[in-house]
């Protein structure tokens, strides 16, 4: 197998969960060149994977076919003579490119009228009985094998911080007079919706508690542009602007990976940044609300999950259907701080 192409998922957390698949494929086909076609949003994840030879970025847009772009990409990819392509998203449009590029083996899960476009496939698991995401992606690695085999490959994602991103972050920290040895990173956002976001007042109280215990501590609020208002609210509720820095939307994902990699500890919701922290083996507390930590846990010995496992959870709803959001409101800052202290 000389060339393998991966069509990447569209979400950061899902992209991190695919890294063990890359490890497995590299073990199965050590001479193969593994390339990844990814949106600009998730491409930095694959730049942090040492198994990947080339990351091919494309300006994909959500819920857009972009037929002309896909045809052009297929023409470009056809010249690379890939023997196999793993199509990790479930959509019809994600399977178009390898089919148009005449890649012989097109591997993925069945769904969304992909018959013919995918020619080696598995049934999608039911939403009721879903395996952990890492295992979901790893299962595809067996479809090119003559028989199923047990593999000793690690099933925990691992990322590497690029030297370029690390230098960039070190310069930013020095410019802000932040000592990385006393750095905590808070990730208060979650693109899915409010039922994955621990309340801003709790983040603010946790920040106060940390700073009461260590006046030299520095806290960076990390996320995308959409998280800027959440971070501003946390700053406003603490009133400690000199020690709490809102970097939401002002770092690239490559820089965010580097920043999380050098942090003393991370506190996050169930989000893509949570999975990045786990893959970098940074000590972290991960707070779960409406989602299921059995399905998408942070896979690291240095991670601690807080989840109340209420009778109404996991509901997987974007807005609390009962209106109380107890699954997050009832996880108190003191509990998070106590858990955080066990990681130090």
Image: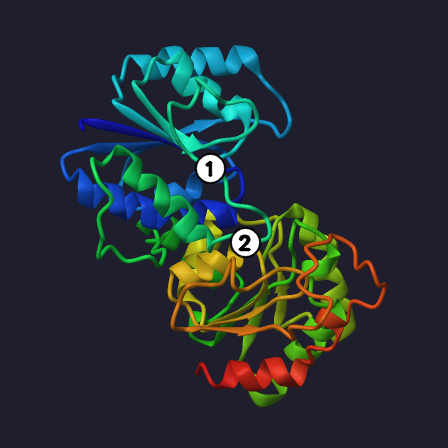
Q: Relative to residue 91, is residue 282 depicted above or below? A: below
In the rendering, at what x and y percent does residue 105 appear?
31, 23
Secondary structure, mark 1, is loop
Q: Nearer the viewer, residue 248 or 157?
A: 157
Q: Nearer the viewer, residue 259 or 43?
A: 43
Q: Nearer the viewer, residue 136 or 72?
A: 136
**Tag 1: Cα neighbours inside 10 Å, few (<14), some, or many (≥20)?**
few
Which residue has dot 2 on it?
129
User: Could you say which quadrant of the image residue 74 lies in?
Assistant: top left
- Residue 96's place in the image compared with 29, above or below, is above
Q: Residue at x 70, y 73 (%)?
A: 310
Quarter-wise, where is residue 4 in the image? top left
Q: Determine which residue is flagged by label 1.
A: 123
Q: x and y percent of residue 203 in the render?
A: 68, 72
Identify which residue, 173 or 209, lies in the foreground.
209
Instruction: For the residues labelled 1 and 2, say whether their Cβ atoms are less than 8 Å apart.
Output: no
């Amino acid at each position: 197998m000389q060339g393998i192409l991966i069509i990447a998922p569209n979400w950061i957390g899902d992209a991190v969960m695919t890294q063990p698949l890359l490890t497995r494929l590299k073990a199965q086909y050590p001479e193969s060149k593994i390339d990844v076609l990814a949106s600009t949003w998730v491409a930095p994840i694959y730049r942090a994977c040492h198994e990947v030879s080339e990351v091919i970025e494309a300006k994909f847009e959500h819920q857009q076919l972009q037929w002309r772009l896909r045809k052009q990409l297929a023409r470009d990819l056809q010249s690379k003579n890939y023997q196999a392509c793993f199509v990790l998203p479930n959509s019809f449009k994600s399977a178009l490119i390898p089919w148009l590029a005449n890649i012989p083996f097109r591997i993925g899960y069945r769904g969304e009228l992909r018959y013919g476009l995918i020619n080696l496939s598995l049934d999608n698991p039911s939403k009721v009985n879903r395996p952990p995401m890492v295992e979901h992606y790893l299962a595809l690695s067996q479809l090119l094998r003559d028989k199923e085999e047990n593999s000793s490959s690690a099933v925990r994602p691992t990322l590497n911080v690029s030297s370029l991103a690390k230098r960039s972050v070190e310069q930013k920290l020095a410019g802000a007079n932040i000592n990385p040895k006393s750095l905590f990173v808070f990730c208060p956002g979650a693109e899915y919706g409010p039922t994955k976001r621990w309340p801003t007042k709790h983040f603010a109280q946790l920040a106060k508690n940390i700073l009461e215990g260590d006046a030299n501590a520095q806290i960076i609020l990390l996320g995308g542009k959409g998280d800027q208002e959440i971070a501003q609210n946390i700053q406003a509720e603490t009133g400690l602007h000199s020690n709490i820095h809102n970097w939401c939307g002002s770092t690239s994902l490559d820089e965010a990976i580097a920043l999380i990699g050098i942090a003393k500890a991370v506190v996050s919701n169930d989000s893509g940044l949570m999975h990045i922290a786990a893959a970098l083996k940074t000590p972290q507390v991960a707070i779960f609300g409406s989602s299921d930590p059995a399905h998408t846990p942070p896979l690291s010995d240095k991670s601690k999950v807080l989840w109340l496992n209420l009778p109404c959870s996991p509901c997987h709803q974007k807005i609390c259907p009962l209106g109380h959001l107890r699954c997050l409101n009832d996880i108190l800052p003191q509990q998070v701080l106590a858990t955080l202290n066990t990681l130090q």
